[in-house]
């Protein structure tokens, strides 16, 4: 594969960029087991991001994907009911099925040039058996952002039945307008705010994620975490502490926003040149665009042909349960993005040619 436009983050940092040159302390780090729920210092720096949180509200995991896993493992027994926002990062949906839960959904709808949650559908889906409502904000794959009014509505719906809210917030810090997406944390007493260093922080190789929740639940989930990966790595914990120093954190988010602000116009210009085929509700955050197309080809088939014939990878809308869409990552270096889009142009030309013959 020559061009990976399926990536959902931005061009990653290298260690020297994060540490700013020589770092004797880094070279002297012990490679033993660190504290399994994350060092006190790391959890304190994570807690500082969230109003009225302290280190005991935080569980550090190996990426936000492990945070999702231990949460679902602890919550779901056969037949337990969850309600999931769609489209979404589909791990929660898949884990719900794997753990033999009853998975319901409510959707984002394309309304007035934006993706907005169907709150009426959420109200219909949630009932007294609902244990968990899973949302993604900012959203993957659409880049939609829910602000305070919607967060309060969802919290109110959960509160009426005592359901927990799992809020995947890994794209917080990638907003194109620079306004940080509000967290669900602090809006309702039963919240698990999940985040990590893979997306907005451009540090996916560290595999550091976290859950911010009540102290009792953080302690419970810690036990599940001890039987999956045990702990984050010592070096990842150390580098995460560096990344979350307030000045460094601000610089990283500025870099991320500069990348998406620079690259989204490249993608939009490409869509405009192919407007007879593609359309886009502009993302408000993130490094992915959910592009609608009107070609007479299944999205998975389109993605497979693009990979096999043009050595370029995208994500088909089928992956999110929505054919007729493709997800394109635009957080790469701009020349790489342009070259990958050219490969899609080439395949579209072939499809047009075969359709006209």
Image (cartoon, rainbow, N blue to C red):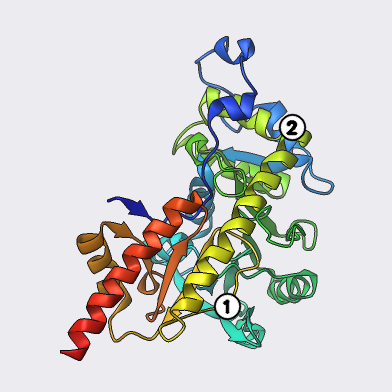
Residue drawn at 51 percent across, 27 percent down:
233
Which of the 4 image quadrants contains residue 147?
bottom right
Q: Secondary structure at mark 1?
A: loop
- Number of the front mark, 2 or 1: 1
Q: Residues within 10 Å of mark 1 (few under 14, many from 20)?
A: some
* In the image, residue 47 above or below residue 331: above
Q: Please state the horizontal and vertical placement of residue 242, each as a whole percent of the image.
A: 67, 28
Query: Quadrant where the C terminus lies?
Result: bottom left
| Front-most of residues 5 and 232 | 5
Asked if residue 5 shows in the view, the reply is no
- Front in this rendered view, residue 23 or 335: 335
Task: Tell which of 272 and 211 is nearer to you.
Answer: 272
Q: Left or right of 343: which side holds 53?
A: right
Q: Position of residue 108 (x, y in %)?
A: 57, 79
Q: Residue at x 32, y 63 (%)?
A: 343
Q: Which residue is mark 2?
A: 245
- Compared to residue 170, the image places residue 134 above or below, namely below
Answer with the quarter of the image where residue 294 lies: bottom left
Which residue is denoted by mark 1 in the rendering? 281
């Amino acid at each position: 594969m020559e061009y990976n436009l399926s990536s959902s983050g931005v061009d990653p940092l290298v260690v020297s960029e994060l540490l700013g040159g020589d770092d004797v302390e880094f070279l002297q780090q012990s490679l033993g087991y660190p504290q399994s729920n994350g060092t006190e210092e790391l959890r304190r720096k994570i807690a500082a991001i969230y109003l009225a949180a302290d280190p005991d509200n935080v569980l550090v995991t190996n990426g936000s994907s492990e945070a999702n896993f231990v949460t679902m493992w602890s919550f779901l027994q056969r037949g337990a009911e969850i309600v999931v926002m769609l489209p979404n990062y589909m791990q929660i949906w898949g884990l719900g099925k794997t753990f033999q839960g009853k998975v319901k959904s409510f959707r984002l709808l394309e309304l007035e040039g934006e993706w907005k949650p169907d709150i009426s559908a959420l109200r219909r889906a949630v009932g007294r058996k609902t244990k968990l409502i899973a949302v993604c904000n900012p959203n993957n794959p659409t880049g939609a952002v829910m602000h305070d009014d919607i967060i309060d509505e969802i919290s109110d719906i959960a509160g009426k039945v005592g359901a927990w809210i799992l809020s995947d917030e890994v794209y917080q810090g990638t907003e194109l307008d620079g306004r940080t997406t509000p967290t669900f944390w602090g809006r309702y007493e039963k919240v698990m705010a999940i985040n990590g260093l893979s997306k907005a922080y451009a540090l996916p190789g560290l595999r550091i994620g976290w859950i911010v929740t009540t102290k009792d639940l953080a302690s419970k989930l810690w036990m599940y975490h001890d039987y999956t990966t045990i702990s984050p790595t010592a070096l990842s914990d150390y580098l995460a502490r560096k990344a979350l120093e307030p000045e460094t954190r601000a610089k990283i988010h500025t870099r991320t926003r500069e990348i998406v602000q620079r690259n989204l116009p490249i993608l939009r210009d490409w869509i405009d040149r192919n407007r007879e085929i593609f359309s886009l509700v502009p993302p408000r955050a993130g490094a992915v665009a959910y592009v609608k197309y009107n070609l007479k080809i299944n999205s998975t088939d389109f993605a497979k042909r693009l990979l096999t014939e043009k050595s370029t990878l995208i994500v088909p809308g089928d992956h999110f349960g929505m054919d007729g869409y493709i997800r394109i990552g635009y957080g790469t270096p701009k020349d790489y993005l342009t070259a990958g889009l050219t490969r899609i142009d080439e395949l579209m030309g072939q499809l047009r040619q075969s359709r006209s013959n």
